[in-house]
Amino acid sequence: MLRNYIKIAFRNLTRNKVFSGINLLGLSTGITVCLLIFLFIMNEFSVDNFHKNGKNIYRVMRGIENEGKETAVAYLSGPYAPALLNDFKGQIAQAVRVNPTDALVTSEDQSFHERKIIDADPNFFTFFTFPLLKGDPATVLTDPASVVLTESTAKKYFGTIDNALGKIVKIDKSLAVKVTGIAQDVPANSHLDFDLVVPLENYKDRSWMNVWINNGLYTYVQLAPTVSEAQVERNFPRFVDKYMGQILKQAGFHFNLSLTPLPAIYFEQAAFDSVKHGDKKVVYIFLSIAILILLVACINFMNLSTVRAVERSKEIGVRKVLGAIKGHLVWQFIGESLLLATFACVLSIGMLVLVLPFYKQLLGYPLNLSVYALPILLFLLAIIVVVGFLSGSYPAFVLAAFSPIQSLKGKLRMGRGGTSLRQILVVVQFSISILLMLGTAIGTQQMRYLKNKQLGYNKEQTLVIPIDNDDIYNFFLGHKDELLSQNRVEAVSMMSGEPGGFFDGLMFDVEAHPTRWKARTEFADFDFVKTLGLKLIAGRDFSPQYPTDTARAALINRTAASRLGWTPDQAVGKWLKSTLRDSTNRIIIGVIEDFNFLSLKEAIEPLVIAPNSDRRAALIRLRPGGNLTATVAMIQQLYAKTRPAYPFEYHFLDQQFDQLYKTDLRQQTIMSVFAGLAIFIACLGLFGLATFSAQQRTKEIGVRKVLGASVGSIVTLLSNDFLKPVSIAILIASPIAWWAMSNWLQGFAYRIDIEWWLFVLIGLLAIGIALLTVSFQSIKAALVNPVKSLRSE
């Protein structure tokens, strides 16, 4: 009997090629989208789950209060780890310090500017589970003159990992270290990423290794199996007071310590943190999209399965007359649904393999299918069972209950209930599609608004050169005048943070203010305002004519003056003093207009600009016009004359937007693709229903044409049946989209107003797509010769 059911199922699928094709394409596309999102979600929630002792590992965090909000900061100083081990004996089993950095690495006759280096304690490879291909995890970093390379880095330097072992490389042209181990490449689902690991012992004399207040590295602790994080955190206030109480009182700071579990680090929104982070909101948004798209595909499947089942009424009648019981008929239909769902899953695997390379590019990181083979298989089995039973059960139970006499007479119809259900399902489909379309449109508008917003500074034709090594620093220190003498260079400035980059936050004593005040800081040379084209609204700029400006002057922005209760003119002449940086008071000599030096997700904060030797970036502003490529080449040639070891690396300031909103832009692109696929799947189902409707009403169309109906009136008649549910879908989706996107926009300090016309435009677009989809079958049916239509049965 089972063999007979399978034969009948195959015959029905091959006989109705158009409907089977639409069903397969719609369902397989929906399943493929779900698989892509499933892979993304699995990767996001699997970050750091490969560490053997992961459940007992925590990162120590500082919580800093600012204007009533607490900001989590990941960086600590070197003394924390030994002090924690000493004060929490029996509770903290071990600790490891990690310092992410970059350096010039010289191997034989090659030099590489490596961006992913970490300096770590000797127990790094026993603390974390990063498997070694060569070397002993317990001893591989015990010698300060050692280094561990990843497999890819070893091959890049020496060709093979065997050749690499024992070789000497130089860090920053001075520190010679021997390759003592080769680690497997760091998996994509790790919040820490590295190409080289260097013993932290080499930097024991640095201030951030010895001075409590100079924070610059991460501290991880492993708790004893029987100890909870709450037990340790309970004693942190006493610990802070013991070692930092006097320092914090003097500086005017206050912070607390806390522990973040290793699996939670990836989703933690920490400030000043260079490790990889994800966003749980995004994960849940993508999960919702996967469910919605699969629902659209299932509705297609159910709708088309139902309408095709009606045409098998005579088959059902014959089976019932020959003694088939209701249960057998139910399983026949469910079996066919399961079979079609199985075909769709097989097809989706092929589609997944085809689109995966493009998907990896969109996500920005690799995905290893083999790692998720078992979860994918279980996911597909669940899809087959759920979709097969869900889609096959309605037609199965309804058809199996019909009278065999009515079935054999060909009078079987699904009635108003069946039609209403199909209409409701079409409404749900298009509500989902329109919701995704509106979300994509509003998101695109917001990103366009951010990109085109005037930021208050000149970002055009401005080069940004990171100062992360002595070669670059010395070049600008010694050749700034030579650069300015070039006719294509308008201004040059060295500073601690370029717009869109990192800005320190310090505490200040301020004239006539009893409490200490916190502000963002920019340490720059005298050409900062000129290079960025900032507007001075009160007072004057820094000037070489006033030698005391270096140690005694400061500029503030309009927001800083406002927060301190002054107008720009009132602020000029007042003094302020950094509790950590300055030994004497600085006089506010000028106030600049606000400019967006942070991301547009954040409101403008108070900013203090002071001359200081802290230099982390250089900006070169070029004159408009001229050959940009030739100008950059000229600067590179000038740099090359200094015989540097480090390469000259730069980007343009107007490219900072793509970096700041890289994640948002990537998510927007993916969302657009998924919204397009959702509308495509919905239109496939609409096309199938329009085909069925035209076939069912063949005689009616013939009669209408004989009685004088025009082609246009018939097309309108057939199209109206489908435009009504699409119009209802617009009314349902619009308020939901407005609410959801309003909440999303709250994450931006600067955001668009959601306009009413956008909903009208998307609604008309949805109606246009639906009309285009059904009009083909409507026109085809309307053009058929009425004689042929009346003879169709």
Image (cartoon, rainbow, N blue to C red):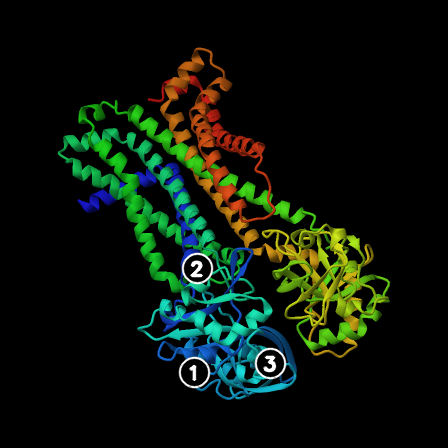
Q: Marks 2 and 3: CB-CB under 8 Å? A: no
- In this rendering, the answer to whether 478 lies above or below 265 is below
Question: Where in the figure is residue 693, as x and y percent of width and height?
Answer: 38, 26
Disc 1 residue type?
A: Pro
The local crowd at label 3, few if under 14, some if 14 to 19, many if 20 or more residues have their Cα within 10 Å, is few
Amino acid carrying mark 3 in the image: Arg
Q: Is 194 left or right of 126, judged from the image as shown?
A: right
Q: Percent from the top left, x then y, of residue 713?
A: 48, 17
In three-dimensional space, the C-alpha distance between marks 2 and 3, rounded to whole angstroms, equals: 36 Å
> Is 438 above or below relative to 248?
above
Secondary structure under the numbered disc 2 in the rendered image: helix
Under tag 1, what secondary structure?
Answer: loop
- Between the C-alphas of marks 3 and 1, the distance is 26 Å
From the viewer's side, name the closer residue of 364 and 327.
364
Q: Is residue 786 left or right of residue 655?
A: left
Can residue 216 be seen in the rendering of this structure? no
Residue bearing the label numbered 1: 137
Instruction: Name the image quarter holding the C terminus.
Output: top left
Q: Give the mark nearer the N terminus: 1 vs 2.
A: 2
Circle 3: element type: loop
Q: Which residue is mark 3?
A: 206
From mark 1 to mark 2, how far is it between C-alphas? Answer: 27 Å
First reached walking from the N terminus: tag 3 or tag 1: 1
Residue that mark 2 sits on: 44
The answer to whether one can see residue 346 in this image is: yes
Can you give x and y, in whole percent of width and height, for residue 137 in the image?
A: 43, 83
**Quadrant of the image for the N terminus?**
top left
Mark 2 and mark 3 lie on one chain; the one further toward the N terminus is 2
Residue nearest the observer in this picture, 483 or 92: 92
